[in-house]
Image (cartoon, grey):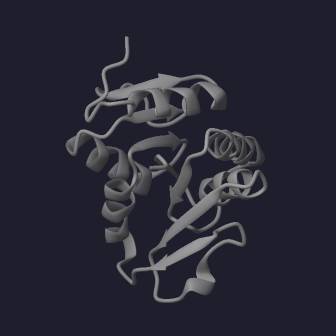
């Protein structure tokens, strides 16, 4: 079964963060994973674009009632009409999470992920949080996300 990697981050970001997300998405596709995200713009779009352009499957779990809200790189839009509560679905669906930058919505997803024992990898995100495995590059984020879920339910990376 393909691994599902969640990419979480803000709906608005600068070009540098967008490019980081795009590289993460590309890596997920190259590793044969399915990208799970919130389906909107910013980090979510960057990651979806990177995966989509490299033949990957992208799933967008949308906050609103219309699948047309999804960015153009989402292969499978899932309409929830749950607003921010959809963050729980993103975290539950993903085998591991890569947090890139982000605001309070990202913080909620990180917290839910940690509470549920999901591996959470941080790339330029909320600093100094226990349980997050911080990395410096998109390649390191993807490698760590896949490594963390090989036969494990809770991550412990040395």
Q: Residue reaching furthest bottom?
A: 66
**157 or 43, nearer to the observer:** 157
| The quarter of the displayed image where residue 96 is located | top left
| The quarter of the displayed image where residue 111 is located | top left
Compared to residue 55, the image places residue 80 above or below, namely below
Residue sitting at 43 percent across and 29 percent down?
127
Give the image location of residue 18, x and y in percent. Answer: 71, 48
Q: Is residue 74 left or right of residue 4?
A: right
Q: Is residue 4 left or right of residue 77?
A: left
Q: Tell me, yes or no, if residue 12 can be seen here.
A: no
Residue sitting at 31 percent across and 61 percent down?
88
Compared to residue 18, the image places residue 87 above or below, namely below
Q: Tell me, yes or no, if residue 109 can be seen here.
A: yes
Give the image location of residue 8, x and y in percent. Answer: 49, 51
Q: Residue reaching furthest front?
A: 1
Residue sitting at 53 percent across and 23 percent down?
135
Give the image location of residue 84, x and y in percent. Answer: 37, 69
| The quarter of the displayed image where residue 35 is located | bottom right
Give the image location of residue 15, x and y in percent. Answer: 77, 47
**136 or 13, nearer to the observer:** 136
Residue sitting at 44 percent across and 76 percent down?
63
**50 or 30, nearer to the observer:** 30
Quadrant containing the C terminus in the rendered view: top left
Q: Residue reaching furthest top?
A: 158
């Amino acid at each position: 079964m393909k691994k599902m990697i969640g990419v979480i981050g803000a709906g608005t970001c600068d070009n540098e963060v967008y490019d980081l997300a795009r590289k993460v998405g590309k890596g997920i596709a190259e590793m044969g994973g399915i990208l799970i995200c919130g389906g909107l713009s910013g980090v979510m779009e960057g990651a979806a674009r990177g995966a989509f352009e490299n033949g990957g499957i992208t799933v967008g779990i949308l906050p609103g009632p219309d699948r047309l809200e999804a960015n153009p790189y989402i292969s499978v839009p899932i309409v929830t009409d749950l607003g921010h509560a959809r963050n729980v679905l993103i975290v539950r669906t993903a085998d591991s999470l890569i947090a890139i930058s982000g605001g309070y919505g990202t913080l909620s997803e990180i917290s839910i992920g940690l509470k549920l024992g999901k591996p959470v990898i941080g790339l330029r995100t909320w600093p100094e949080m226990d349980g997050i495995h911080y990395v410096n590059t998109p390649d390191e984020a993807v490698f760590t996300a896949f490594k963390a879920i090989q036969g494990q339910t809770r991550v412990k990376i040395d």
